[in-house]
Image: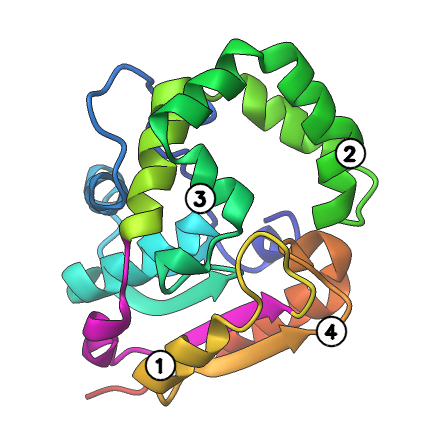
């Protein structure tokens, strides 16, 4: 955002249950977050804009482009599951209530394990363990459980033919969180999509290969959108 902010007005949105957003809701489904993005744009008077989303955020962004096509001029997904079954087994397990409650009832050891072991396996950026630990501290068991469970059940493949706007998928070949070949169903469903792969990156190419990532993203956003 710091890089793109020099060229574009940028907005960051925390989904309900995460970051600084409210955490007192009954549901935290992907469909809820799709509606949240629409409400966010409505409240800020953003009529039409590109959406860029990472991981579940990309799945949501693509869903917004399908459900509210008038809102989205371009869509970029980064390491995002097109099919929820592509999530890593550990993450899918965390979407089950007994596992989620076990993890959150042992939050101290869980966070320590995530910070000092797992974080290094999924991202090579030395800043990432602290970033992940901070994010976990702002997440509730319900938002974590319900959002992952909903993402696990998501399958956008039958809907991808509705995506007519410029689209790009950015995927790290070493992704251990989402299957690194999720660009394939995206390209099959959206044949005009621009696919960018990062051979040395995992789930966080914006951290592991920041310069090429930012440059390729900006180049895509700079391209004029065809008029119909």
User: Circle 1 is placed at which residue position?
Assistant: 225
Density class for disc 4 (Cα within 10 Å; few <14, some 14-19, many ≥20) is few
Q: What residue is at 47 percent from the left and 25 percent from the top?
A: 19
Q: Earlier in the sequence, mark 4 or mark 1?
A: 4
User: Circle 3 is placed at which residue position?
Assistant: 92
* Any part of residue 68 in sight: no
Measured as percent of width and height from the top left, residue 116 is found at: 79, 29
Front-most of 216 and 191? 191
Residue 174 occupies which quadrant of the picture? bottom right
Say how many tags the image has: 4
What range of the chain is rendered magenta? 154-172
Q: In the image, is 78 to the left or to the right of 116?
A: left
Do labels 1 and 3 touch, CB within 8 Å? no
Residue 51 occupies which quadrant of the picture? bottom left
Foreground disc of the pair 4, 3:
3
Give residue 199's mark: 4
Give residue 117's mark: 2
Q: What residue is at 33 percent from the left and 19 percent from the top?
A: 22
Q: CA distance from mark 2 to mark 1?
A: 43 Å
Measured as percent of width and height from the top left, residue 132 is found at: 64, 32
Q: Is residue 56 above or below residue 111?
A: below
Q: CA distance from mark 4 to mark 2?
A: 23 Å
Measured as percent of width and height from the top left, residue 123 is found at: 73, 48
Q: In the image, is 47 to the left or to the right of 201?
A: left
The colour style of the image is rainbow
Q: Earlier in the sequence, mark 2 or mark 3?
A: 3
Measured as percent of width and height from the top left, residue 8 is found at: 51, 57
């Amino acid at each position: 955002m710091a890089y793109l902010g020099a060229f574009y007005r940028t907005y960051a949105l925390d989904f309900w249950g995460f970051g600084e957003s409210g955490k007192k809701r009954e549901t935290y489904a992907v469909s809820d977050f799709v509606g949240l993005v629409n409400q966010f744009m409505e409240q800020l008077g953003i009529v039409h804009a590109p959406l860029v989303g990472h991981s579940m955020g990309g799945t949501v962004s693509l869903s917004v482009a399908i459900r509210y096509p008038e809102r989205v001029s371009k869509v970029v997904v980064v390491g995002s599951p097109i099919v929820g079954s592509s999530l890593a087994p550990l993450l899918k397990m965390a979407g089950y209530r007994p596992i989620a409650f076990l993890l959150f009832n042992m939050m101290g050891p869980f966070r320590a394990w995530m910070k000092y072991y797992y974080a290094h396996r999924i991202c090579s950026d030395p800043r990432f363990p602290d970033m992940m630990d901070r994010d976990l501290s702002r997440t509730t068991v319900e938002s974590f459980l319900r959002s992952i469970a909903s993402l696990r059940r998501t399958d956008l493949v039958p809907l991808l033919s509705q995506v007519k706007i410029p689209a790009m998928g950015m995927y790290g070949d070493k992704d251990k969180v989402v299957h690194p070949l999720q660009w394939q169903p995206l390209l099959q469903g959206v044949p005009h999509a621009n696919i960018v792969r990062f051979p040395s990156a995992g789930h966080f190419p914006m951290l592991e290969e920041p310069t090429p990532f930012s440059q390729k993203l900006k180049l895509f956003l700079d391209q004029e959108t065809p008029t119909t």
